[in-house]
Amino acid sequence: MDAMEALSAEFPDVEFFHATGYKSNDTNFGNYFGRIYQARYLTGLTAGAATESNEIGYVAAFPIPEVIRGINAFTLGVREANPNATVTVNWTSTWFDPAVEGEAAQALLDGGADVIAMHQDSTAAGERAEAAGARWISYNSDMCEYAPNAYLSSAIWNWGHYYALAIESVADGSFAGGGTWPGMETGMVQIGSLAADVSQATRDLIDQRSQEMIDGSFDPFTGPINDQEGNELIAAGETPPDFAPEGLSLLGMGVFVEGVVGSAEG
């Protein structure tokens, strides 16, 4: 991101696009990401309905707002489907390390989790869930073939829609830098395939919440929502802004919601 920022100033006739960051300018440097937390909420519905132990594990990379926001949205979905379930977080301090991810998943399984979710880039957590006879929520893409018996659902990316728009904006001269953070309404973030044993009731709820997020009538982070200590975090009817210099915001989220077990500080 910092390198692209510097190069965008050095080469003003080149258009630069950076994923997941927060820096941009109003000429030739843009940032893009998607509201993957919406899809994570939907996968939480499947996890909450599937767990029998009421203990769900989450293998997580780094304690940054993106990851914390996803864990929170997932947990809110879990708790809509099953108010008695909890989500225990195990931090790995890596985006991609199959050995570390597998060990983190195994620790959660050994602790009683019967569903494993993740914010990681390998299939290791799913493979451990498969071996343990547990269930698995994948990320990035629909990874059902790697752990077919464990696979439950997935939060997936479809970058093609944005890339087509980005290329068109450069071709027609309309690109002017800035940031974009779209959600399910563009198809950039989606829920992948569902396991065959996901109930019709859960499928119907996923369809309902999906449509509501697309039309803007539902947001996973609309209160009342408590923090993990049971204190009010978001008041009834309120939704945090995307960004705020002070107070809670989606892009600056650094605390866990009720139902999460573990530290948001890593």
Image: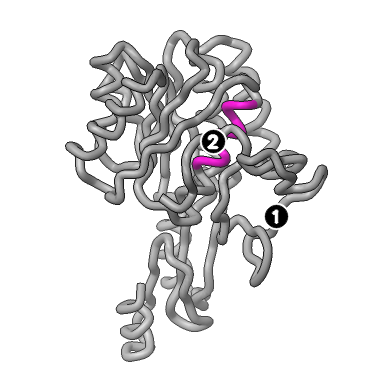
Q: Is 159 on the left or on the right of 128, as rendered?
A: right
Q: Residue at x 29, y 16 (%)?
A: 148
Residue 259 x/y as whole percent: 59, 32
Does residue 176 show up magenta in the picture? no
Tag 2 or tag 1, which sits nearer the N-term?
A: 1
Report which residue position mark 1 lands on: 240
The magenta region covers 71-79
Does residue 76 show up magenta in the picture? yes
Q: Secondary structure at mark 2?
A: strand
The CA span between labels 1 and 2 is: 19 Å
Q: Residues within 10 Å of mark 2 (few under 14, many from 20)?
A: many
Q: Is 177 on the left or on the right of 232, as rendered?
A: left
The picture quadrant where one finds residue 57 is top left
Question: What is the residue that sits farthest to the bottom in this orientation?
Answer: 10
| Mark 2 residue type | Val
Reply above or below: 154 against 224: above
In the picture, the quarter occupied by the N terminus is bottom left
Residue 102 x/y as whole percent: 23, 32
Q: Give residue 260's mark.
A: 2
